[in-house]
Image (cartoon, rainbow, N blue to C red):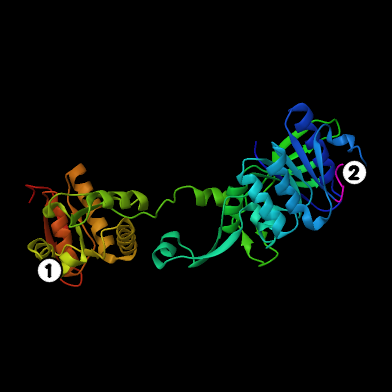
Amino acid sequence: EKSVLLLGRPGVGKTTMLREVARFLADDQNKRVIVVDTSNEIAGDGDIPHPGIGSARRMQVPSPELQHAVMIEAVENHMPEVIIIDEIGTDLEAAAARTIAERGVQLIATAHGNTLENLVMNPTLSDLVGGIESVTLSDEEARRRGTQKSILERRAPPTFDILVEIQSYNQVAVHKSVSETVDSILRGYEVPPEIRELDPEGELTIAKEPTAKERHRPESGLPVATEADFAAAASPRQPPDPGPERRIYPFGVSRQRLQQAMRETQFPGSLVDHLDDADVVITLRPYYRRKPQTLHDAEARSIPIYVVKSNTVVQLEQVLITMRSERANDPVTTALKEAEDAIGQVLNKYNTADLNPQNAYIRRLQHMTAQRYNLMSRSVGKDPNRFVRITPSGAR
């Protein structure tokens, strides 16, 4: 029941294929098929239609400029199940095809063009595959997607669900989901079509088109990603090693939305109920301005406080991304991760661990980290080589 668009250069066999499709649907599938025959190319100009269309009905078009009107008339007055159209080539015909598709009638049509990409870039016929438009994203959405602010997106659902590129008499390329393929093209990825070919013995073989390592669009000369790149982009992104898990104390922030933001960004952390258990605080701007006692206590303990403008998932995702990027390049993060690793070694092997030399502030944070695990720690040496030594509880 899906609508199909046939693409191919002139003389490759599109009209011949349309005749066979009309015969098959009318005779073998017993459907009400109407052929909109512009310039009498499909069924001829005689009183008796070409036998190649079987029992399908023919509607002759008096003038090529009136093809779109005959297409609409066929739907309104003749109750077809399938309409077959040869050569959609104008804006009016493309609009008429969309109208027919929206009314639940199956469309089988042809258009000039070698590939689906040609059709997407054709301003007259791009509506057949959904059309494209330039969209300006907000700063937040552009950062979230990791793209520029002005992007191309598909404007509407495609008129045709399936597109067939006729490459030769015995070989076609099939795009089974036009909407997904167009979306991929607009994002800069290329999804290889399914290749169907008749061998000399008449057997049908089906295979995926081999993907080139790098392809270039003629319009821009920019490289186009291959199917492997698209699969990698479509799969959930694995963030870089973010270090030890963060214990977040949400103050005035929705816990449910914060948990959703953590899932969306794959942030390694957990929510705690008490400030004593936290190593970071997230709060709203109004609370931070009033500075209640909880935030005073957090500052006194040198616990980082992150402030968001509003209690939305997007804002919370941004602050989590900021936290992760800061940890990736922050010497404090590196020092605390070293302390966490040393603590694990002390707990497992019950021996002493010496950390790398740090300044007084970082050493204080390392002492607090050891204290949370009920381990003993002390600073050894003189600056700038003073370091923290962590020992098991009860050891001297």
Residue 7 horizontal side relative to residue 95, left or right? right
Q: Tell me, yes or no, if residue 288 can be seen here.
A: yes
Mark positioned earlier in the residue sequence (2 or 1): 2
Residue 104: x, y in percent? 62, 40
Q: Residue furthest front?
A: 77
* Quarter residue 284 falls in: bottom left
* Type of amino acid at the residue the image marks with label 2: Gly
Q: Nearer the viewer, residue 89 or 261?
A: 89
Name the residue rendered at 70%, 39% in the picture. Answer: 207
343 in magenta: no
What quarter of the picture does the N terminus occupy? Answer: top right
Q: Which residue is mark 2?
A: 44
Q: Nearer the viewer, residue 36 or 163?
A: 36
Q: Nearer the viewer, residue 393 or 50?
A: 50
The magenta span reads 39-45
Q: Which residue is mark 1?
A: 290
| Circle 2 or circle 1, nearest the eye | 2
Residue 206: x, y in percent? 72, 36
Label number found at residue 273: none
Q: Tell me, yes or no, if residue 170 can be seen here.
A: no
41 in magenta: yes
What secondary structure is found at the residue carrying circle 2?
Answer: loop
Residue 378: x, y in percent? 11, 59
Q: Residue furthest bottom?
A: 384
Name the residue rendered at 15%, 70% in the picture. Answer: 289
What secondary structure is found at the residue carrying circle 1?
Answer: helix
Residue 14 vertical placement versus 55 (above, below): below
Q: Callout 1: few (<14), some (14-19), or many (20+) C-alpha neighbours within 10 Å?
A: few
Name the residue rendered at 66%, 40% in the picture. Answer: 105
* Type of amino acid at the residue the image marks with label 1: Arg
Q: How many marks?
A: 2
